[in-house]
Each structure stands twice: as C-alpha cells, then as structure tokens.
Image (cartoon, grey):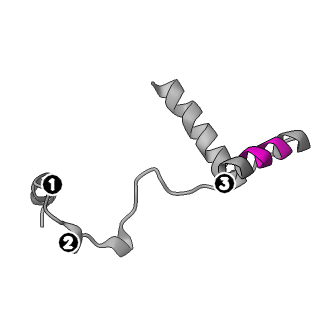
Amino acid sequence: MKTTELDKRFDAGEDVSDVIAWDSARRINQEPRRVNVDFPAWMVSSMDREADRLGISRQALIKVWIAERLERKAG
C-alpha cells in the first residue's frame, strides 16, 4: 500500500493497524539517548520530593521539566 492510500484511509477514520508493521515501526527523533548529568545532593533531594508528590520517577520528572522548558522556548 502506498503512503497516499494509507493517509486517505487514516484521514477517513478507517482502522489502518492491520497494514502497519508494528515490530519495525519507530518514531523519528524519538530514539532514546543516554545523557549523564551530575546534580548537587540538595537538587536530587528536591527532585525526589517533587517526583514522590507527583507519583512519578525522578527520571520522568526531569524529562517532563526539560520538555516543558523546551516547548516554552520553541513557542
């Protein structure tokens, strides 16, 4: 199936999941890359308290905060 046909079916609200190879699908620019950052102990403690308050991991909190900042900058 050509992408134009897929787009037409999708835009029409049809279920196109049967023609997508989910095992090889990927989101462009969404591949995870590991980054190491050192924070002072007081920042880690503060992040942990906020993450606990929100019920998420420290890593998720950092991702959310950075994403919010980047979205504000782009907007």
Query: Percent position (x, y) of residue 39?
Result: 83, 42
Residue 46 lies in magenta, yes or no?
yes
Mark 3 element type: loop
Kindly identify the amino acid type of the residue bearing the numbered disc 1. Answer: Asp
Residue sitting at x 25%, y 69% = 20
- Amino acid found under the numbered disc labelled 3: Gly
The residue furthest right is: 41
Whichever of labels 2 and 3 marks the residue nearer the N terminus, that label is 2
Along the polypeptide, which appears first: circle 3 or circle 1? 1
- The 10 Å Cα crowd at callout 2, few under 14, some 14 to 19, many 20 or more, is few
- In the picture, measured across the screen, residue 11 lies left or right of residue 29, that is left
Q: Which residues are magenta?
A: 45-50
Residue under pointer 1: 7
The percent coordinates of residue 50 (x first, y second) are 73, 44
| Badge nearest the viewer, 2 or 3 | 3
Would you place residue 71 above or below residue 30 in this image?
above
Left or right: where does residue 3 sit relative to residue 74? left
Up the image or down, 28 lies above or below 21; here it is above
Q: Are marks 1 and 2 in contact (CB under 8 Å)?
A: no
The image quadrant where one finds the C terminus is: top left
Q: Amino acid at mark 2?
A: Val
Instruction: Read off the residue under disc 2.
Output: 19
Q: Which residue is mark 3?
A: 55
Q: Residue at x 20, y 74 (%)?
A: 18
Q: Are dots 2 and 3 in contact, CB under 8 Å?
A: no
Q: Tell me which secondary structure the magenta stretch mostly adopts.
A: helix
Q: Is residue 41 above or below residue 18?
A: above
- 14 inside magenta stretch: no
